[in-house]
Amino acid sequence: MNSHPLPAPPSTSTSILDKLGLPRPLLWGFVGLMIFMIGDGVETNILAPYLTGEHGFSIPLAGTLVTIYGVAVAIAAFLSASLSDLWGPRKVMFIGAGIWVVFELLFLGVALHSSSMPLIFIAYGLRGFGYPFFAYGFLVWISATANAKRLAVAIGWFYVAFSSGLPTLGALTASASLEIFSLSYYQTLWVSLALVVIGAAIALIGVKEKTGRAALVSNPEEVFKTMSFGLRLLASNRKALLVMLTRTINSVPTYGMAVFFPALFVDRFGWSVGQFLILTTVIYAVNIPFNLFFGALGDKLGWSKVVVWFGAVLCAISMAALYLVPAWAVDHGYSFAYALTLVIGAVFGIGLAGFVPLSAIAVSLAPEHPGAAMASYNLGIGAAVFAGPLLVALLYNVLGASGMVFLFAALYLVAAIMSHALRGTQPGFHGVQQPATIAAH
């Protein structure tokens, strides 16, 4: 993938990019990341209905498959920063893209055709190492090269590109593939693979910045020390553990809903899988601008307060409403049932953004080791990928769809209690103690 760089944007755009806080040398990386994550998001949203509808999987079995995939995602998310330091971000991104493509080809071309259950689990499970290496490797590249004064904005753009793809435009692309172009689920999975290849090529060919092409540290023993410190931080600092668990709950429904909500839409509400994909698009399209809003609001009102009320409590209410409102409207035959569900979904997307200040809380707990603090935070992100499907696999047959929704809502209330315990982590806010003092406890 080292042939010729993509043409650079016109020089007149430099000042515009600077004002937006987009690092110009990494611009094609942001474009490639978004397309890569669109491809990943296409499959995330249709895999469960495809396997249950055409390969005889039960919903719990599909949840088990995605759980194994999620374990790989969690491990890769935790390792990606340290490996980027050791090998260089670009190499980690290249490895991530290679893993995604190779194991997806094995999954689509061999495992599904042979209906070999062990091969399906091995191929799809190992593919879970792919996107975290690619995406979070690029995040390290941004952190290593962006202007320090605009680093927060540059990282914000990373999450805009990431979230625009997974699951927002990924869900929209899947819906278009199924309902506009009338492709099958299996054909749409190949569309997913094509988008990942295109996105990886754009990022790896288009970004010519030199720093990310080599190791970022000269003392590799420090990297392993940082990795172990991240685990020690979780074991020794109660608030660090609370941050990780709260971050996990933040994203559990994203991955749990993808397993059983398509069947809920079809069997209970009489809607289509495509309409579920539209709901997913609405949730995360609304979420993107509110990520920036709640970051700023947290600085003014307090990080913990925003997470508790605008994140956890709002998500608990809107999560329950995502079942109760459409069930009530459909049972009464109201024509606006689906439109009302989209409104509830938008509110849920706003609530998900309320968890944004958690990343600032994580770093404040160990300001002298921000990499380790973020490694533990990333572990919470990755843990959600398997925790959501695992809960579905274990409890769906017992609780049913409605019970799973109420369980997720209850988890958000648990997150509210945990994030309330994180007050006092914001330096200089209403005279609270500094994070170095907090971390000592």
Image (cartoon, grey):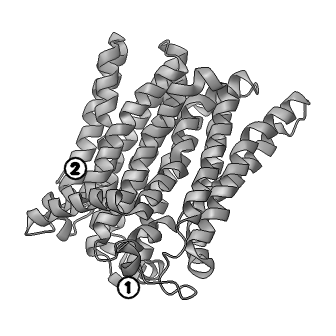
Circle 2 is placed at which residue position? 94
Of residues 385 and 38, the one drawn nearer to the viewer in this rendering: 385
| Tag 1 secondary structure | helix
**On screen, residue 99 above or below 371:** above
Image mark for residue 381: none
Of labels 2 and 1, the one closer to you: 1
Q: To which residue does mark 1 refer?
A: 149
Q: Which secondary structure, mark 2? A: helix
303 or 157, which is in the foreground? Answer: 303
Residue 115, placed above or below residue 187: above
The amino acid type of the residue labelled 2 equals Phe
Classify the position of the C terminus by image quarter: bottom left
Looking at the picture, tell me which residue is in the foreground, 210 or 347: 347
Q: Is residue 22 visible?
A: no
Residue 115 in the image, given as x and y percentages of width and height: 36, 11
Q: Nearer the viewer, residue 141 or 122?
A: 122
Quadrant of the rendered image containing residue 415: bottom right
Residue drawn 31% across the image and 54% down it: 202
Residue placed at 29% from the left, 77% from the top?
368
Mark before the other along the chain sequence, 2 or 1: 2
Image-based side of 1 in relation to 185, left or right: left
Task: Report whether 122 appears left or right of 54.
Answer: left
Q: Position of residue 418 (x, y in %)?
A: 55, 58
Q: Residue furthest front?
A: 441
Q: Is residue 118 above or below residue 27?
A: above
Whole-angstrom CA distance, mark 2 to mark 1, is 29 Å
The part of the image, by quadrant, that contains residue 285 is: bottom right
Left or right side of 311 for 2: left
Say which amino acid is labelled 1.
Answer: Lys
Q: Is residue 29 visible?
A: yes
Q: Kindly identify the residue that appears in the image at 65 percent across and 59 percent down.
A: 350
